[in-house]
């Protein structure tokens, strides 16, 4: 391994070990977006190995998001999120098997929406803890107000 790789690994390890549970979930969503985009880019370039690797890593993260939920805290919320993540997972599989870039873009939009929602929640919680008004978190993609509302129907 190169010294740069070791430094990046050490940085990521430190970041993960010092993050709050909320920040860890945000990091997972960021990773899911990164790998879904890598898979889409591989698909667009007809580099099916890169596509497979990106989609596989994204699916693994989505499974981790499902498995890390704690239904004893809020069963209704966990059931809804589990349904959303299961939908994202199955849509990602179908889109990658069909080699359909547009379908992958819809999956990415859902993950972006979830990521942006989670970032706003973290911001709100931090503001409440500090006793200050919530700031607006920076979305992962195009401005949130520029994107259409999303639903699992399409």
Image (cartoon, grey):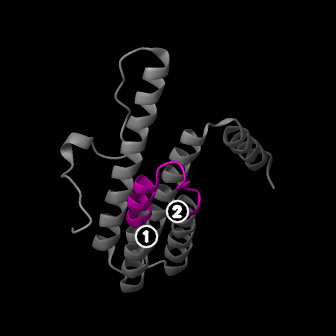
Q: Are marks 1 and 2 in contact (CB under 8 Å)?
A: yes
Determine the residue located farthest toward the bottom in the rendered image. 98
Residue at 60%, 42% (x, y): give it: 21
Per the image, the residue denoted by label 1 is: 86
x 36%, y 40%: residue = 139
Crowding near pointer 1: few (<14 within 10 Å), some, many (20+)? Answer: some
Q: Is residue 153 above or below residue 27?
A: below
Q: Residue 17: which numbered mark, if any?
A: none
Q: Which residue is mark 2?
A: 66
**Secondary structure of residue under mark 1:** helix
Question: For the point 49% across and 21% down, which residue is it?
Answer: 129
In the image: residue 109, left or right of residue 129: left
* Majority secondary structure of magenta residues: helix
104 to the left or right of 54: left
The quadrant of the rendering that contains the C terminus is bottom left
Is residue 75 found inside the magenta-colored segment of the image?
Answer: yes
Q: Residues within 10 Å of mark 2 (few under 14, many from 20)?
A: some
| Residue range of the region highlighted in magenta in the rendering | 67-84
Residue lying at 40% horizontally and 55% vertically, measured from the top left: 76
Q: Under tag 2, what secondary structure? A: helix
Q: Is residue 48 left or right of residue 106?
A: right
- Image location (x, y in percent) of residue 75: 46, 55
The numbered mark, 1 or 2, whose residue comes first in the sequence reads: 2
Q: Nearer the viewer, residue 80 or 145?
A: 80
């Amino acid at each position: 391994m190169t010294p740069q790789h070791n430094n990046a690994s050490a940085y990521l390890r430190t970041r993960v070990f010092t993050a709050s549970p909320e920040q860890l979930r945000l990091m997972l969503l960021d990773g899911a977006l990164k790998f879904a985009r890598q898979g889409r880019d591989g698909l667009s370039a007809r580099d099916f190995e890169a596509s497979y690797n990106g989609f596989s890593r994204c699916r693994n993260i989505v499974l981790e998001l499902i498995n890390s939920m704690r239904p004893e805290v809020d069963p209704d919320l966990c059931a809804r999120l589990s349904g959303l993540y299961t939908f994202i997972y199955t849509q990602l599989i179908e889109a990658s098997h069909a080699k359909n870039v547009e379908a992958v873009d819809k999956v990415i939009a859902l993950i972006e929406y979830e990521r942006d929602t989670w970032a706003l929640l973290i911001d709100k919680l931090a503001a409440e803890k500090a006793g200050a008004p919530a700031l607006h978190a920076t979305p992962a993609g195009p401005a949130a107000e520029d994107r259409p509302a999303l639903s699992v129907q399409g």
